[in-house]
Image (cartoon, coloured by chain):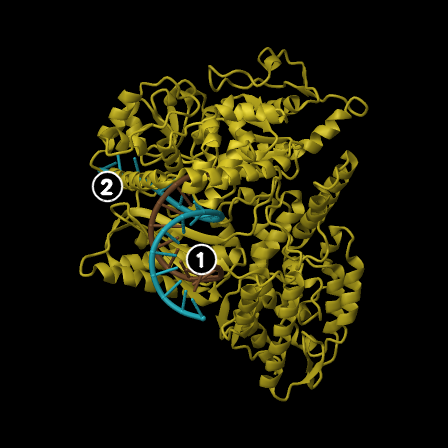
Chain colours: A yellow, B brown, C cyan
Amino acid sequence: MASHHQGGADLLSRIALNDNKAGMEGLDRDKINKIILETSKGSKFYENELKKEQQVNQRIEKMMEQKARITKEQLKQAQAEVDKLTCELERSRELGRVIVHVDMDAFYAAVEMRDCPELKDKPMAVGSMSMLSTSNYHARRFGVRAAMPGFIAKKLCPNLVIVPTNFDKYRAVSAQVREIFSEYDPHFMPMSLDEAYLDITEHLEQRKHWPETIGPQPFSTHELSPVLFEDSPSSSPSLSGADGKAEVFGTSAEEAVREMRFRIEQKTSLTASAGIAPNMMLAKVCSDKNKPNGQYRIPPERQVVMEFMKDLPVRKVSGVGKVTEKMLAALGIVNCDQLSQQMALLSLLFSGTSWHNFLHISLGLGSTCIERDSERKSMSTERTFGEMSDAEEQYSLCRDLCHDLAQDLQREGLKGKTVTLKLKNVKFEVKTRAFTLQYAVCTEEEIFAAAKDLLKVEIDSVSPQPLKLRLMGVRVSGFISAEDKKPLQRSIMGFLQKDGSDSGSFTQCAGSVLKAQEDSDGASFLKPQSTEMKVPSVSEQKSKSKGTQQQSFFQRAQLKRLQQQQREQMSVMAGTDTTNNSADAAAATQIDLSTTNNLSDTTSAKSLSNTNSGTDTTCYVNKPAVLKPSFKISTQVLQFLTCPVCNTEMKDVNLTAFNNHIDECLKGSAVDNEPTHLDVPKEQKELNSKPPASSSESRALKSSSHDPSCNEEKPSTSISVPLVETDEDGDFKTPFFSHRTKINGKRSVISKKKMPVCESSSKASLTTTHNLEAVTEMSSDSKGSSLTCPVCSQPQSTDDLTLFNRHVDMCLNQEVLLEFRESHPPVGHSDEPALKSVRGQCKNKNNNQQQQQKRIINTLV
DNA sequence: GGGGGAAGGACCA
DNA sequence: TTCCTGGTCCTTCCCCC
C-alpha cells in the first residue's frame, strides 16, 4: 500500500513521468524524473502542482479516517447491496454487439513523419517549446511524451526536433480515415481527429453472406506503407511481404478490423490500432493493448471478459485518472480484480455515481450503444497569455472573448442564461465566477455586461494590488431548451402557418439549420428534435432502423443513394445561382408585409406539407422558381429589427441594408455548410459569413491583423499557443472537429466534437416545396384593415396594435405550454420546474424572440 | 430535506 | 524564458422554501 503521507517522492507523482503508455517501457525512470524535477522545480507551475498534490493527500487521509470508522455490520449490509446490484447488472449484460475502438498511432507525429521522411529516424515531437502534442517512438525512448512542455523535452533529448502543428493537414487525413470508418459503420462515433468507436455488428452480418454475393473483398496493395515504427508489427502479415497482389480478408470480426486497418494504411500510409469487444469500455482498453499497429479482441463470452478484467490496472480504464488511481491505490486497489473485491467498501466511501461506475468496470460492463452526442450544455472560449496586470487590458480582453463567444453562440443558434468568468492567476490558481441572468443571452454586449461585472468584483477584491492573470475565459451555459426556443421559430413561419408543422426544420436560426444539415448526412452528432422535425430525415429513418432491425445491404445502398441525391441537389442549387439562392432563402425567411395580414391560406400550406410527412427527405429541397424578390420587407418604418438568422439586433436600420444583411447571413450559413468546410479556415468563413457594417466587423479585421490586447501573448507564430490534447496513446489531441483555429494566435472553437462523416452541401435555404408555394400564394393576398393572428389564425383588429400584440403573446404562451405538455407528458412532479421555466420564458418581457415578432408586427402599421 | 445555483475539481480528447 | 483548451460531469457548500 502506497504511503500517501508527506513523502517527498509521493509529492512528485503529479509531475513525474507517466510511462505506462505505448513505446515507453523499460526507460530509466529515475534519470528522467530527475531531469524533469530539476527543470520544473521552483516554477509557479510546479508549486501549484505540489499544492494540488497535497490536497489529494488530504482527501485520502479523510477517506482513510472514514474507512477506520466503518463497522463490520455496515460492511455486511453494503456487501448485500452490492451483490443485489451485481445480479441485476449480470442479468442485463449484453454481449451481442461488436464494438470497435480505432486509434491512429502517434497521429500528428506520424503525419509529419510521413510528409517529411528525414524525420523518420530522428526523435521528434509535434507542438512547441511550451507544450508538445505528441512524440514519435524514438522520442518516447528519451521519456519525451505528449503533455510535456517542449523545453523539458529538450532537456531530456537535446536532439529532439519539434515540428509545429498543422491542423489542416491532420483534418484532411482524418477525413480520409473517416471515409473508411463510414463503410463499416455509417453511424460511427468520432471522438477526436484520430479516434472513433464503431459498431460493426451489422457489417459483420453482411460479411457472412459474402460468399453468396460478392465474396471476400480483395484489396490491391498498390503501395507499401513507410515503416513508421521500426519495431512495430505489420497490420497484416501478408502486407509486409506484399508482392503487389491482392490482399483478401475473411468474414470474422478480426478480419474485418484487420481489413479496415489495412485500408487505412493503404490510403494514408499511417497505421492504426484497434480494440474489438462487446462494449465501448472494453474496446477502448483493447485498442491500447497491442499499440502501435496492432489489434486485440475480447470475444463475447462472460468468462473471457471477467478473465480479461482480472489483471487490468484500473488506470487503464477510461474515466480513471491520476487522482482516482491514487485514491484507489491507498485502499490497496490497483487492478480490477481488487476493485471487485472491495466493492462493499467502495460503496461506503464513494458517492453512488462513483461506486456504480466502479462496479460496472469491475464486471467488465460498458455501453453497448454508440450514441450520438447529446445536446451541448455549454460553450466557452479561453485564452492563455503572459502575465497581465493592467485592468484596462483585462477588460479589453474580456470583451474580445465575449465577442468570439457571441459569434460561436450565434453560429449555433444558442442562448444561455449563465455567464461564467474563468480566471487563472500567475500562480496557476483557477477561479470561476458565475452569474445567472433572468433571460438567455447570446450577443457580445449582453455577455460582456455580465462578464465585466464578474471581472470587476475580482479586480476590486485584490485592489489596490493588481490582479495578475495568465488566463481568462468566458463561458455561457444554461441554454434555453428547444421548447423555449419555439417562439423564435415561430417568429417567421408562425406568420405563414398556423401550426408551424414544417417550420421547425426551416425557421430555426442559422445554427440550427446547420444541425439539421449535419443530421441528414448520415453522421449527425446531434439528435433531431422530434418536436421540430415533423418530416423524418434520412438519418432519422436510419437511426430508427438501427438497433431495432438490421438493415440489408440493399437498404443501406438505397439510403446512400438518397443522401447522394440530396447532396447533388443541394450542390446544384448552391452552384447554379448563389445570388438567387440566397435571395430565395432570404425571401423564405422574410415577410412581405403585404402578405402577413391575411393568412387564411395557411390551411393549404399545412395540408400540402402534411402530404409530405413520412416521405423521404427530398422534400427538404428548395424550389428556387417559386421565390420572388417581392417577399422582401417593403416598409420603410422599421426602427429596430432582429436578424432572423444571426439574431443580431439592428437599430434604425435601412431596409435594404437589413435585407442585405439577412442575405449575407444566409449566405454565411450556407458557406458554413459547404462540403469543404472541413478545410475552410475559420477566418475565411467569418469573412464569408460576416454581417456587413456591424461594429464587430472592425474588431474582427483588427484582430486578424493586430490586436493590442493580445500583445502579451507569446509570439504569434503558428505555434505560439500549443494545441495539446491527450489520449490513450499518450498523445495529446485536439477534440475531434473542434475547428480550432487561431485569430492572431488566439484559439476558439467553432463547434464541438460533432462532425459529419462527410459534409453535405448547404441546406441554409431548406424548406419544403409546398411551404414555398404557400408563401407565394399568401404573398399575392390583398391587404386588409385587420391582421390575422399568426398563432390562432383568427382575424384581429389592428386599430390598437398593443391589443393585437397582447393577443399574439397570449396565443403564443398557450401554444408553447400546449406543445410543452405534449412533448413532456407529466411524470410525477418532475416537469413542474421546467414548466415554470417555460412560463417564465413566455412572460419574460426581455424575451428576444417574442420581441422580435412584435417588432415585425409593429412594422405592419 | 430537497432543489438549485455557485464554485471548484477530475477527467476526457 | 517556457506547462493548453474546451467540454462534461461530479461534489460540496450554501441558501431558500
Location of residue A779 in the rendering, given as x and y in whole percent from the top left corner:
72, 73
Q: State the image quarter where residue A836 is shown.
A: bottom right
Q: Earlier in the sequence, mark 2 or mark 1?
A: 2
Residue under circle 1?
A476
Residue A122 or A355: which is nearer the viewer?
A: A355
Residue under circle 2?
A44
User: Which chain contains the residue that carries disc 2?
Assistant: A
Location of residue A769 in the rendering, given as x and y in whole percent from the top left corner:
75, 60
Label 2 and label 1 in one chain: yes
Q: Tell me the residue at 77%/62% (across/down).
A: A609
Q: Secondary structure at mark 1?
A: strand
**Residue A270 visible somewhere in the drawing:** no
Q: Amino acid at mark 2?
A: Lys
Location of residue A264 in the rendering, given as x and y in whole percent from the top left corner:
59, 26
User: Which chain contains the residue that carries disc 1?
Assistant: A
Q: Count the labels in the image.
A: 2
In contact (CB < 8 Å): disc 2 and disc 1? no
Q: Quadrant of the N terminus of chain A?
A: top left
Q: Quadrant of the C terminus of chain A?
A: bottom right
**Residue A708 visible somewhere in the drawing:** yes
Q: Tell me the residue at 37%/22% (across/down).
A: A139
Q: Secondary structure at mark 2?
A: helix
Q: Is residue A285 above or below residue A432?
A: above
Q: Is residue A230 above or below residue A851?
A: above
Mark carried by residue A303: none
Residue furthest to the left in view is A464
